[in-house]
């Protein structure tokens, strides 16, 4: 089994993205999540990437992606106590609202293009 810990040493939120699934989990300051994969081979199980988004950073949010390189992409994420941490864990409600609005806008635009005879998708 492969294991990697992700700890938020920042003063604001750290969003841990589990890739390639695109799942988000939000860590508070000083919080640690553990990612476990069933992979037992000799190749790299995980890779970690960080990136800066100016809008996120101005809102006190940092981003890190844990990429599942080998093994089942449905890795297990737990907290220090071993509790399972699901996608969307601790996601702020404001973020939920923004993402939902963006999704609805995308659906609206796709429907308009389809109604106008444009190829969609």
Image: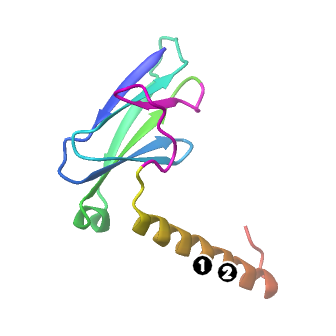
**Left or right: residue 92 compared with residue 21:** left
Q: Tell me if residue 47 comes above or below residue 63 in the rendering.
A: above
Density class for disc 1 (Cα within 10 Å; few <14, some 14-19, many ≥20) is few
Q: Tell me if residue 35 comes above or below residue 28 in the rendering.
A: above
**Left or right: residue 29 compared with residue 68:** left
Between 103 and 27, the one lying in front of the other is 27
Between 67 and 35, the one lying in front of the other is 35
**Left or right: residue 11 compared with residue 52:** left
Quadrant in the rendering for residue 52: bottom left
User: What label sits on residue 51 in the rendered view?
Assistant: none
Quadrant in the rendering for residue 16: top left
The residue labelled by disc 1 is 105
Contact between labelled residues 1 and 2, with CB atoms less than 8 Å apart: yes
Q: Main secondary structure of the magenta part?
A: loop
Residue 107 position within the rendered picture, expressed as x and y whole percent measured from the top left: 67, 75
Q: Quadrant of the C terminus?
A: bottom right
Residue lying furthest bottom: 116
Residue 43 position within the rendered picture, expressed as x and y whole percent measured from the top left: 47, 17
Q: Tell me if residue 89 comes above or below residue 103 in the rendering.
A: above
Residue 82 position within the rendered picture, expressed as x and y whole percent measured from the top left: 42, 25
- Residue displayed at 23% across by 67% down: 58
- Residue displayed at 52% across by 11% down: 40
Residue 47 position within the rendered picture, expressed as x and y whole percent measured from the top left: 40, 32
The residue labelled by disc 2 is 108
Magenta residues, as a range? 72-89
């Amino acid at each position: 089994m492969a294991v990697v810990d992700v700890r938020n040493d920042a003063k604001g939120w750290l969003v841990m993205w589990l890739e390639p699934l695109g799942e988000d989990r939000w860590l508070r300051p000083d919080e640690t999540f553990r990612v476990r994969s069933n992979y037992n081979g000799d190749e790299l199980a995980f890779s970690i990437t960080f990136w800066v988004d100016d809008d996120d950073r101005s809102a006190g949010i940092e981003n890190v992606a844990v990429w599942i390189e080998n093994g089942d992409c449905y890795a297990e994420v737990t907290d220090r106590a071993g509790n399972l941490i699901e996608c969307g864990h601790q996601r702020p409600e404001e973020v939920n609202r923004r993402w939902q609005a963006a999704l609805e806008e995308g659906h609206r635009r796709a429907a308009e293009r389809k109604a106008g005879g444009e190829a969609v998708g």
